[in-house]
Image: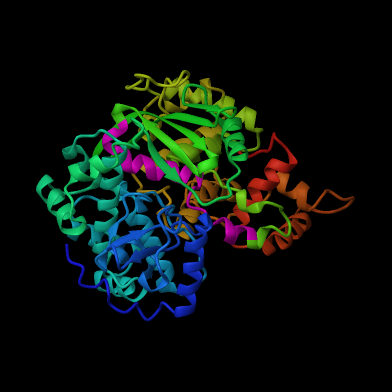
Amino acid sequence: MSLHSRSAPPPPAETAGADDARYLALCSRDRRFDGRFFTGITSTGIYCRPVCAVRTPRRENCRFFDHAAQAEHAGFRPCLRCRPELAPADRCWSTQDAGDILMRHALRWLDDPAQHQASDGSTLAQLAERLGVSDRHLRRVFARHLGVSPLRVLQTRRLLCAKQLLTDTGLPVAEVSQAAGFGSLRRFHAAFRQHYGLSPLQVRASGARARQPGVVWLGWRPPLDVDGLLGFLAARALPGVEVVRRSDGVYARTLSLAVAGRTHAGWCALRFEPERDRVGLQVSDGLLPALPAVMVRLRALLDLDADPAAIAAVLEPAFPDAGGLRVPGAVDGFELATRAILGQQVTVAAARTFATRVVEAFGQPCPDRTDAPAGLERLFPAASRFLEADAAEQLGQAGVVRQRQQAIIALAQAVVHGGLDLSPHAPLSATLSALQALPGIGPWTAHYIAMRALRWPDAWLPGDVVLLEALAPRAHGERPRERQRHADQTASAWQPWRSYAVIRLWADQSPASVAS
């Protein structure tokens, strides 16, 4: 392993004052900074999270990095104790320069193994095309903001992903290599030797003592209102598909997803450990080969990469303890959008009833139920199921009115044949326009989908009954348009975190909101 850069001067963007502040966070092991930076220790060649429990290094032996790829590019290898692969991702919503925004979109895409194949060259071209820029411009943006190439970031992501699978699971090394996105087992072994100076089996042995069989860990930055998050999910949980136990902090569900052209299905279960700011994840054998992609989807579902400090700075004047808020996401954009359509202008309970009927009519039995939590039986139907000849008739038998039948079928056609992307990587404005061009989908439904499936932190749902009652109570002679204008004006102070305000207002005002 080359350590040629370990003693090199820090990048020009890093000022001494910023590094001093980071060192103070390191000394206090402040969990709010977890994932926001990494510390390379020149005396050991190791880089750590700011919450690492090892003895605090001397200030002169510390180099600070915004991203793990920067630390590895400088010749540092990941700490086996604090495990940088467990750090929450940096997902700050930004109004900064276009290059910074472009880079953050690219980082999110590179973090998701379901979005790209193992071939590095095609991955970069695919990413550049998706972002609407050239390969050269993308490399230039990464060089300016991170000092490393996109391919170096991708390599670091794959190595850290493989390191977590080796440490936390019993997957055979060959399957770890494939799941992490390496093109061959030989390249996998060579990469570990080159970058970490260890073989994959040595990494596995290092975590054997602390391993809990079948459990991988997902961390978050505190605070997090676990009960509020589980309460939101429990109110909307679909029998047969989801199980929520608030008493012992458990959420479980069935799941089907495609990675690298293959479909994987099974069940996953999450158990929260609030005292350690982490949640344990178990998956069935059917999902193990796609475990990295499952982890990405569940992080989005639980909003684990949120920045509580940034959210609280804007919202706490109006909402105490706003830092604990999370906007529940989705494990599948089509599922979320379908449930949003079924929930139009009805209560949460009614929306759940309609969705349950749809699952019973269209959903397939979960193919892997071995050791599954009680109550997990069926998969939410794929979009292609709603394109069958008798789909409208079956939806009608489930009690879905004609307008929503047409909306669901049109949505399925757009996803299957029209290339409509409902993932967090989708372009916001274009996706909102595409959704509202479909029959039966208006601004409320489109913004709700954007808030949860596209992970837009600043969604604001026009015409939402609960929001209007909370911010613009009905007055004698007051027109709906005037009420909406008043609510919009009040909410403008909460940008760019209005989605979090929506979740709090829904929870505060009514358990039977119209949100699905």
In the image, 140 versus 35, the foreground residue is 35
In the image, 221 versus 396, the foreground residue is 221
Which percent across, then down, holds residue 492? 68, 63
Seen at 83% across and 48% down, the residue is 474
- Residue 309 in the magenta stretch? The answer is yes
**In the displayed structure, would residue 358 be above or below residue 226?**
above
Which percent across, then down, holds residue 419? 35, 48
Could you tell whether 514 is left or right of 475 in the image?
left
Could you tell whether 50 is left or right of 42 in the image?
right
Seen at 32% across and 38% down, the residue is 168
Residue furthest out toward the bottom: 12
Which percent across, then down, holds residue 505? 70, 47
Asked if residue 464 shows in the view, the reply is no
Could you tell whether 193 is left or right of 406 in the image?
left
Seen at 48% across and 19% down, the residue is 375
- Residue 89 in the magenta stretch? The answer is no
Number of callouts: 0
**In the displayed structure, would residue 404 be above or below residue 21?**
above
**In the displayed structure, would residue 225 be above or below residue 400?**
below
Asked if residue 346 shows in the view, the reply is yes
Task: Locate the N terminus by quadrant.
Answer: bottom left
Could you tell whether 207 is left or right of 354 in the image?
left
- The span shown in magenta is 287-312
In the rendered image, which quarter is residue 264 located in? Answer: top left
